Image (spheres, rainbow, N blue to C red):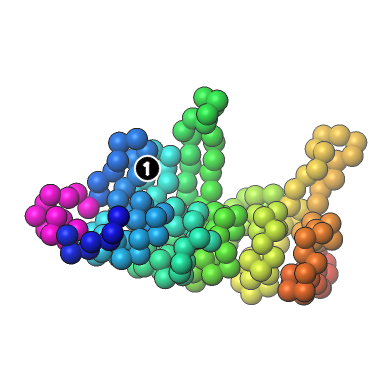
Amino acid sequence: ENQDTARMEQLIKNSSLNVNYQEAKFGQSLLALSVVDKKDLSTFKLLTFGANPNLRAFDDSSPFLDACFNSSSLQDPRKILQILIDHGAEVNSVQIDTTLDQFGNKKRFEASALRIGCIYGNLESVKVLVENGASLTSYGPNEHAILSTAALSGKLDILKYLMIDKKAPIPEYCVIRQAGSIYERKLTISDLLEDDRNANDTDMSKIKEEILAYLKNKAK
């Protein structure tokens, strides 16, 4: 709790503390708890002593994936994610959560670290993942594409970075509305941006127009 790293080091060296200990209820490791609780000193010390950033909990999360989920609330997401990667975190790891929800149904959640970053993270966290080798192409087409995730999440700065700066594949469409009906419509990224009423503040509006101009030039 108070990040007594000296005491932690003593316990680990005396074999009184398993550096990869996992609590019984959810299977979260000490490293995962340190990451989520924003205990940066404890996170670094645990990694120094060999804590596994890829150790899976019962929901198939890991300390690294937890950092991706919580990157928007971390004090320095770039620093924490980079430290985890430097200590062996798998940048293209995927969480497949088949645990039961509150109604007893399987969750069937599946997402890569980058997709998690596009939904729950911020531009800095996404940049760290891409700079360290996160794949932009190991996804299906259209609604499965990583740009579709960024667009549907409304993260225009991430969308611009992945599309314009990193040249991620542009999908033919992002989502199908009213599928199977006579009103079925396949929406492109341009469609989504044109319909987005939340991207009208000065900064977002500028990014939006830049993306639309780029897509027009690409005939998308």
Viewer can see residue 150: yes
Furthest-right residue in this view: 182
Q: Give the range drawn in magenta.
A: 8-19
- Tell me which residue sits at (27%, 56%) in the image: 51
Picture quadrant where residue 14 is located: bottom left
* Three-letter amino acid code of the residue under disc 1: Ala
The image shows residue 203 at horizontal and vertical percentages of 73, 74
- Tell me which residue sits at (54%, 65%) in the image: 126
Viewer can see residue 138: no
On-image quarter of the C terminus? bottom right
How packed mark 1 is, by other alpha carbons closer than 10 Å (few <14, some 14-19, many 20 or more), is some
- Residue toward you, 74 or 46: 74
Furthest-top residue in this view: 104
The image shows residue 177 at horizontal and vertical percentages of 80, 43
Residue beneath label 1, please? Answer: 57
- Residue 187 highlighted magenta (yes or no): no
